[in-house]
Image (tube, rainbow, N blue to C red):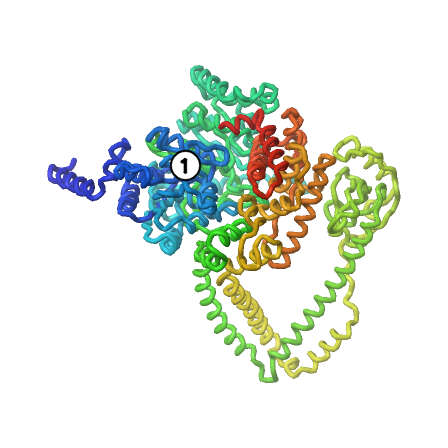
Amino acid sequence: MSSPAERYAAARRRAAQASMFPALDEFALDLGFDLDDFQREACQSLERGSGVLVCAPTGAGKTVVGEFAVHLALRGKAAEGDVGTRRKCFYTTPIKALSNQKYHDLVDRYGVDQVGLLTGDNAINGDAPVVVMTTEVLRNMLYAGSSALEGLAYVVMDEVHYLADRFRGGVWEEVIIHLPASVTLVSLSATVSNAEEFADWLVTVRGETAVVVSEHRPVPLWQHMLVGKRMFDLFHDADAARKHDVHPELLRYTRDTVRRLELGEGRSAGPGGGRRGPRWRGPLRPDIVDRLDREGLLPAILFIFSRAGCDAAVQQCLAAGLRLTSPEERAEIRRVVESRVTAIPGEDLSVLGYWEWLDGLERGLAAHHAGMLPAFKEVVEELFVRGLVKAVFATETLALGINMPARCVVLERLVKYNGEAHVDLTPGEYTQLTGRAGRRGIDVEGHAVVVWSPETDPRHVAGLASTRTYPLRSSFRPSYNMAVNLVGSVGAEPARALLESSFAQFQADRSVVGLARQVQRNTETIEAYGAEAACHHGDFDEYFALRVAIADRERSLARQGQTQRKAAAVASLERLRVGDVVRVPSGRRAGLAVVLDPATGGFGEPRPLVLTQDRWAGRVGPGDFTSPAEVLARIRVPKHFNHRSPAARRDLAAAVAATGLDRHGGRRGGRSRQPVGEDHRLSQLRTELRRHPCHACPEREEHARWAERRRRLERDTEELRQRVAGRTGSLARTFDRIVALLSARGYLSTGGEVTDAGRTLGRIWSEADLLVAECLRRGVWDGLSPAELAAAVSVVVYEARRDVDERASLPRGGVADAVDETLKLWSDIEADESARGLSVTREPDLGFAWPIYRWTRGEALAKVLASGHEFDGEMPAGDFVRWARQVVDLLGQLKDSGGASAELRSTARQAITEINRGVLAYHAAA
């Protein structure tokens, strides 16, 4: 208990602070809780007139600082009382769902008249003094010189660490650079390890910026590992956590478990050594949920890095008979669900697995991933926040922004698929995922549980849990749209200067200092290596150059042989016809195969579709043939052969086997290494080497080792020098190349002015902005019906989750013609970009054309989802809705584009109307 004197002193301090920061004192009175130190420090900086960067963990309450900026804007307006000079605050978020959430929060606090919302889907009260919007909307306003920017005093950039996002991160930097100097910027970020570097950049482009960093979690987080049926603390205490010291009992138990598994496998292998012992089987998902329930750790989020895994987990829990809800909770869940899905037609609900989903919800269980219908995901989020759903199986997308805190977070694995490969979780990702655990004001502590397997080292988990090195890296790069907008608004030379003020260039320039130091150190080491390589018999540099020349010549001759073999294989594949039986000499598909589709006449190398003797159907290429493909026999392939049918594959594979041909052809396998022929230049170099005086030196090989080290270091140093040169002014050089390409194509005039075509390009917001502009200029999409237009524009929007060998089919007629023209334009652009050393525009993807075509024509959802190209079964409803929304977004740009014909604008409007039905009508209204 404090003394009266201490209480009096504290009251005096509070009174002094209130007189210094009256707005903060007024704001804090309405909060209902005391501000944390970092919140108070950031708000005080804001009231002093400084910009502020706040870095704090998930759930720490960063948004309070953003809400104080809103308070300052409204307070300033009220004080001045003049509508003409009223101050505004724009609150930006990275995703629409977050914008909607923040809009409702601010409306609850300040009233519907004071707050507006602007996203790609919604426009509510856009002239309000406080407007919540996605970051892209603000970027577009800045380029258009919107009148809504008048009176703008504060911009809050929530989740500003999104500027590291590979696809959208550049938008944050564009906004920060282009905002008027009079605007105070409030940047809210997750904890990053280079906050000071980011703040240094903000100071250079925005002026005074205070940095407030807090690593304190308002709700303590306890880390655990679940090993079989036993739960262990990862650390013994807080001191052990700081030192990364894993709990000794956990280490001992996991080592013993691994040893038992290894011994079991050794015993079960038997004398033949063929059979492995039983594999480790971790705890079942229903058992994990049941364990959490018994220990009072629900509600929980269980992260499973697979959509199918999330759905399967719910089914497994249902099959195990888990029920986590009371009868009253079940009734409330059903009421909420039924009120939220009334707009979705009944026949669509059955296609979407509505009844199974509802059964899970009523038992307190749900999945949450991008493949789900957005309406279903929103219901799961609402029920989880209200405590009605107790266990959610989610992919990592749940960690991005949406406010869904839990008491406990479970990580089933520490490896996830990033779209290209399976990779380990980074410390930043681990912190973001486990940061969901612990609800402020509800839980005394949060819990993170990692499920152990023999591949999981507790010390690795301890490193992930304790590491604080996840720096913010810029992903900014100039685009065509950005270039015409910059040139149009400030001119070409000032635009270059603006780009050089980006965070990307700031980081590149800083890294150059370290690289230059490394070059200097390497140069000194090269001189030392040269002294060690010196030979008293003669010039060892000259001798070593001969050795290098011999090795290079041998490699060159070997490559020539490889090239000749590949050319022969390509030529032989081009000659194949349907029904030819060939032998694939090596690789996983080695053996006999029959040609189903020769695939000749296309671009690139021939990749015939074949069926192997083992019933595998797929495409093979020159890389599968170490020698030319030889036609061994011919068999009849049915005219309408369906290689996806197991029965059809079985029958045809039997016909291949019936030819009686030897599967391996009596060859021993392996690549035939052709001996290097007698090359005159090679013989000459070897003669010179033997005649050189250093060849007789007894320490020749020792000298050669030092010379080789020096050569490698010289090569590395030259690469470093090129990196130094490449990073200095790299963005400006890229910008110059983009401007040159746009000038050559007529988007910019020779005098650097933006043309009519350039103005059209400046209003296209798409990764394929230049390709869309070219399609508009050439009238590629004119004369199409609404369904054909939707299908044709989908190819520049859609991107498959994984590569598919076969090209997707297209609706006949106008769509196929338009897509062919689009592919030709893309090919021209790609050639132009490659010639200028620019990043290549992504190739159009045809995989969404059929689904959106059928949907726009009014066909049933079941038929639409069944027509997705890359999916073995149906296209997930969530993927369909997401890509359909992106098609609608691009159609919306076309209907407003000055570069589109009146007919095209009308068709785009009609297509949008026809797409926004059923599950998409719900999403459009949300």
Is 864 displayed left or right of 721 in the figure? right
Compared to 643, does 606 lie above or below? below
Q: What residue lies at 60% left-to-right and 54% top-to-bottom?
A: 746
Residue 56 % position (x, y): 36, 43
| Location of residue 154 (image quadrant) | top left
> Which residue carries the number 1 mark?
132
Is 121 displayed left or right of 653 in the figure? left
Question: Under tag 1, what secondary structure?
Answer: strand
Q: Is residue 461 visible?
A: no
Relative to the observer, which residue lies in front, 778 or 800? 778
Relative to the observer, which residue lies in front, 562 or 231? 562
Residue 611 % position (x, y): 78, 40
Amino acid type at mark 1: Val
Relative to the observer, which residue lies in front, 895 or 687? 895
Rate crowding at label 1 as few (under 14), some (14 to 19) or many (20 or more) other CA atoms within 10 Å. many
The image quadrant where one finds the N terminus is: top left
Q: What residue lies at 50% left-to-right and 54% top-to-bottom?
A: 487
Is 698 displayed left or right of 733 in the figure? right
Compared to 909, does 562 lie above or below? below
Residue 143 % position (x, y): 47, 47
Q: What residue lies at 46% left-to-right and 20% top-to-bottom?
A: 336
Identify the residue at the far left of this view.
Answer: 5
Q: What residue lies at 65% left-to-right and 81% top-to-bottom?
A: 696
Is 745 displayed left or right of 207 in the figure? right
| Location of residue 204 (image quadrant) | bottom left
| Location of residue 72 (image quadrant) | top left
Q: Is residue 724 visible?
A: yes
Total numbered labels: 1
Residue 241 % position (x, y): 37, 44
Compared to 805, does 474 lie above or below? below
